[in-house]
Image (cartoon, helix red, strand yellow):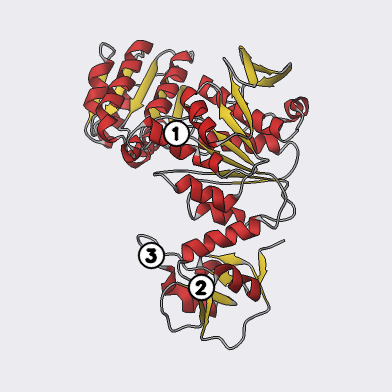
């Protein structure tokens, strides 16, 4: 079942003006924002980005077989004129989602969104076909793109929602119309943009403000700020999770997690990942899936590179956490490193971005955690406020590097078989390049 809509429905939905067309096709089948992916009879939606403008490809789209094209600009080619093509794309995603009655699960939070998304995908896949966000498509374009891929084979849909400012989660929620809303936690990621933890909590809880009255909120029962803030905007069904508290409570025994008398293997190491898994099990519980059935069918979960990704090479264990970093996720990764049975435990850290006036203090606290854990070595890729991190980490051995190449060479010289090495920094720092170059030197 591919996206399909009649021209009458399309024009009514978007309040579109017909320009340069004497007749319209009866039906549109297929939709894309990429002129290279046009299929005959489909709709082309030109989006405007920082480095491109889809309106430059309207003629190409028509030549490639598009039945209709949208435009928010006055152009010479026949088109349907709309006020905002991105808004139109989101409206179409919402409309197509409304053609399905399957559960839609939305996931947001300051840390662990993608990991939790993948755990929910794995859990729900034990009961049927799941359509879920991929990569980093958790924004104004990625969410409608996902919804427009829904077809009759899907039994569940899992939508990740990112945020860089107030109003974004509300907009994405109004597009996806989820039945279940999951908030993993409230932390200081993007605190420089929002100005404080309460502002972040308010923004995350926009997800709950737009849940349907019969929806369910899945909340981290160990996050007091989240619980307090959510109560101000949501009075419907709520299911909390946690290890110390919560409606759905887990108990760890070695590598086994016990939940309501059912045992699960710990799929991902670290307490933070156990909480993410409990969130996924809470989703299953809210959808009336049997935990015992999930336990017998769930064996593993695949995560994208840069998130809790373990690499065994040349006798070393490398922990790839390079996708992003914030104070809470950095400390959780360090806690995990300290628990692992390596000969030496080494952290390679870079700057955490978008912390604003809180940056120096946040870096200082991460450095303090390194010292408290007694790590064997800390390597720091220099950046804004990383000196605060390095200074706070003493008395453990600390070395600071001004460039990636020197850091890579030093790692190759220093590392020994049996070492566990954690790599973590904000995405913009590009620490994954150090990791890959280091791996090449080890081969």
Q: Is residue 353 left or right of residue 69?
A: left
Labels 1 and 3: the sequence-earlier one: 3
Labels 1 and 2: the sequence-earlier one: 2
Label pair 1/3, CB-CB below 8 angstroms: no
Q: Residue 105 at what x, y percent from top left?
A: 62, 41
| Between marks 1 and 3 in the image, the one whose residue lies nearer the viewer | 1
Secondary structure state at the residue bearing disc 1: helix
Q: Alpha-carbon distance for marks 1 and 3?
A: 34 Å
Q: Alpha-carbon distance for marks 2 and 3?
A: 16 Å
Q: Which residue is mark 2?
A: 70
Residue at left 51%, top 33%?
232
Front one among 437 and 100: 100
* Tag shown at residue 434: none
Quadrant of the drawing holding the C terminus: top left
Within 10 Å of the Cα at label 3, are there few (<14), some (14-19), or many (20+) other Cα atoms?
Answer: few
Residue at left 51%, top 79%?
79
Q: Is residue 7 left or right of residue 233?
A: right
Q: Which residue is mark 1?
A: 201
Q: Residue 191 at what x, y percent from top left?
A: 35, 35
């Amino acid at each position: 079942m591919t996206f399909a809509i009649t021209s009458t429905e399309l024009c009514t939905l978007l309040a579109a003006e017909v320009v340069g067309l004497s007749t319209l096709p009866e039906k549109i089948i297929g939709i894309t924002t990429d002129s290279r992916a046009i299929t005959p009879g489909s709709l082309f939606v030109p989006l405007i980005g920082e480095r491109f403008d889809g309106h430059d490809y309207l003629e190409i789209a028509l030549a490639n077989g598009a039945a209709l094209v949208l435009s928010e600009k006055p152009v010479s080619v026949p088109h349907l004129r709309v006020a905002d093509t991105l808004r139109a794309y989101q409206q179409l995603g919402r409309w197509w989602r409304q053609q399905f009655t399957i559960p839609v699960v939305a996931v947001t939070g300051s840390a662990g969104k993608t990991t939790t998304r993948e755990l929910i995908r794995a859990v729900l896949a034990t009961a049927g076909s799941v359509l879920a966000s991929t990569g980093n498509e958790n924004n104004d374009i990625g969410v409608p793109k996902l919804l427009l891929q829904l077809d009759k084979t899907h039994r569940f849909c899992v939508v990740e929602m990112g945020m860089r400012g107030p109003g974004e989660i509300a907009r994405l929620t109004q597009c996806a119309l989820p039945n279940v809303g999951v908030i993993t936690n409230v932390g200081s990621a993007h605190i420089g943009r929002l100005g404080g933890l309460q502002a972040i909590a308010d923004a995350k809880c926009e997800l709950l403000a737009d849940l349907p009255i019969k929806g369910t909120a899945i909340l981290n029962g160990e996050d007091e700020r989240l619980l307090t803030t959510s109560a101000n905007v949501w009075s419907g069904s709520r299911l909390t999770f946690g290890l110390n508290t919560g409606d759905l409570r887990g108990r760890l025994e070695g590598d086994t997690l016990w939940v309501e008398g059912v045992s699960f293997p710990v799929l991902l190491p670290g307490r933070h990942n156990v909480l993410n898994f409990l969130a996924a099990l809470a989703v299953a519980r809210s959808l009336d899936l049997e935990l015992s059935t999930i336990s017998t069918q769930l064996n593993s979960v695949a995560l994208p590179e840069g998130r809790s990704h373990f690499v065994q090479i040349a006798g070393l264990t490398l922990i790839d956490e390079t996708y992003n970093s914030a104070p809470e996720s950095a400390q959780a990764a360090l806690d995990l490193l300290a628990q692992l049975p390596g000969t030496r435990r080494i952290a390679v850290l870079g700057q955490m971005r978008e912390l604003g006036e809180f940056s120096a203090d946040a870096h200082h606290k991460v450095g303090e955690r390194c010292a408290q854990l007694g790590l064997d070595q800390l390597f720091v890729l220099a950046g804004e406020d990383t000196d605060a991190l390095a200074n706070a980490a003493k008395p453990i051995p600390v070395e600071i590097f001004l460039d990636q190449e020197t850091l890579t060479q030093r790692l190759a010289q220093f590392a020994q078989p049996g070492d566990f090495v954690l790599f973590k920094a904000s995405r913009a720092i590009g620490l994954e390049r150090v990791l890959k170059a280091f791996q090449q030197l080890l081969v």
